[in-house]
Image: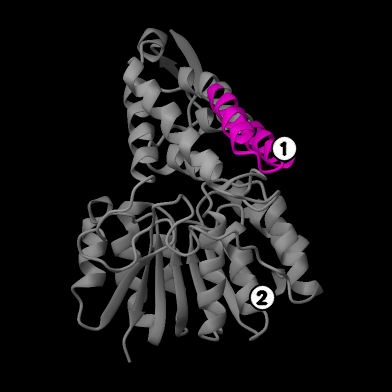
Amino acid sequence: MAVIAGADGKEKSINMKKIEMVPAHVVILLVAAVVVLLAQVPGGPGRFGFGGPPVVENAWSALAFDVKVDDATLLKLRPYFQGAADAQRRLRDQSAGDPAALAQGTQKIQSELNQKVRPALTEDQAGRLSAFLESRQRPGPPPEGFGGMRPGPGPRGGISSSWDISTVPKNDAEKRILETAEQVARYLSVPFDDGRIIRLFAEAIGAKNAAEIGTSTGYSGLWFAAGLRAAGGKLTTFEIDPGRAATARQNFRKAGVDKFITVVQGDAHQEVKKLTEPIDILFIDADKPGYLDYLQKLLPLIRPGGLVLAHNIGDRNENPAYVDAVVKDPNLETILVGSGMTVTLKKR
C-alpha cells in the first residue's frame, strides 16, 4: 500500500499491486495510440501549456476530465508531460524533417513517458485513457443530438486539426495578453485552440458584457480579454477556489486587463443570481452536473443573438440534461466545435 494526499488534503491509500498489474494489452494500446498521435501532429514552443505538440496537453486534459485522476496525481504527473513535450519539440528541430528519425525518437519519448505515468494509474484509469486516445485517431459521426462538426480525427479538434496555425498579435496590448497566457500555470484549463475559439466568438459578436463560470487560474479569461479589449467589453468570471481566484487576479494584472475583468470568488450557483445586465456571451467550464442550473439561471439574461459556450461536452452522454436543454429548445441553435465545446445561439 502507498499513501498520497488527495484533492481534499486528506491522506488516501492506493493498492500498489492493483496498479502494477495493468494488463499488457492496455499498455500496448496506450503506447501505440499516443505514439501515433505524437508522430503526426505539429506544434510550436510555448503554445500549448507544455510548450510542445497539442497531443501532450490533450492527453493531460484527458487525465483530468475523462479519466478524472485526483489533484495529487495530476501534480505528480505534470513534470513528466512537460518533459515529454520539451523532448518532442527538440526532436522536431533535430530531425530536420526525417520521418524515420522522428518516428524512432517519438517512440522513445512515449515509452519513457508511459513508464513514468503508468504506475500512477489504476487498471481502470489506464484503460479509459487508452480508449480516449484511440478514439481521437479516427473520425466518426457527430455525437447524438448535435449538428455542426465533430472534434477529430486529430487531437486539435474540428477547427484546425490539419493546420499549424498560430495567433499573431496585432499590437503590443494583445502581445502582452498572449505572452501572459503562455506563462499561466494551467489547472484544468481549456486547450489552446478552444481559447482561440472563445476569443474569436467574443470579438466577432462585439461582446460588451461576458460572463464565465470557472475562472481557474485565468487562462480562458485572458482569451476573453483578447476578444473584449478592442470593443471595450468587460468580463465577470466566477471561481469557487480562493487560491485559483487569487492566481487569476495576478495573471490579469500581469496582462494589463484587470481593469475590465472582475473575479468573483464563491459558489457560482449562488453568485450568478446577482447578475442583472444583459449578457452577450457566456462560457461554462465548471462542475458538469451544474451546467443545466447555470444555463437556466443565466439564459434569461443572454441577449437575442448572444452565445452560450459550454466546455467538455464531447458526447451527449457526458451531460445529457444540458445537451437536451440546448438542442431541443426551438429558441436555441447548437453546434459542437473544438475539443468538445458546444456553441449555442439564442435566436433573435
Magenta segment, principal secondary structure?
helix
| Residue drawn at (32%, 53%) of the image | 139
Please identify the quadrant where the C terminus is shown.
bottom left
- Badge 1, how many Cα within 10 Å: few under 14, some, many 20+? few
Residue 49 in the figure: left or right of residue 156:
right
The quadrant in which residue 86 appears is top right
- Badge 2, how many Cα within 10 Å: few under 14, some, many 20+? some
* CA–CA distance in space, label 1 to label 2: 39 Å
Q: Give me the disc on residue 65.
A: none
Residue 86 in the figure: left or right of residue 130:
right
The x, y position of residue 206, in whole percent, is 55, 86
In the image, which residues are magenta?
A: 82-111
Q: Is residue 291 visible?
A: yes
Determine if the magenta segment contains residue 131: no
| Residue 210 vertical position relative to residue 56 in the rendered view, above or below | below
Please identify the quadrant where the N terminus is shown.
top left
**Circle 2 is placed at which residue position?**
260
Q: Residue 217 versus residue 195: which sits nearer the camera? A: 195
Q: Residue 135 versus residue 74: which sits nearer the camera? A: 135
The x, y position of residue 119, in whole percent, is 47, 17
**Circle 1 is placed at which residue position?**
90
Q: Residue 123 versus residue 159: which sits nearer the camera? A: 159
The quadrant in which residue 158 appears is bottom left
Q: Nearer the viewer, mark 1 or mark 2?
A: 1
Amino acid type shown at disc 1: Arg
Amino acid type shown at disc 2: Phe
Secondary structure beneath label 1:
helix
Secondary structure beneath label 2:
helix
Q: Residue 43 versus residue 295: which sits nearer the camera? A: 43
The x, y position of residue 276, in whole percent, is 45, 81
The x, y position of residue 292, in whole percent, is 29, 63
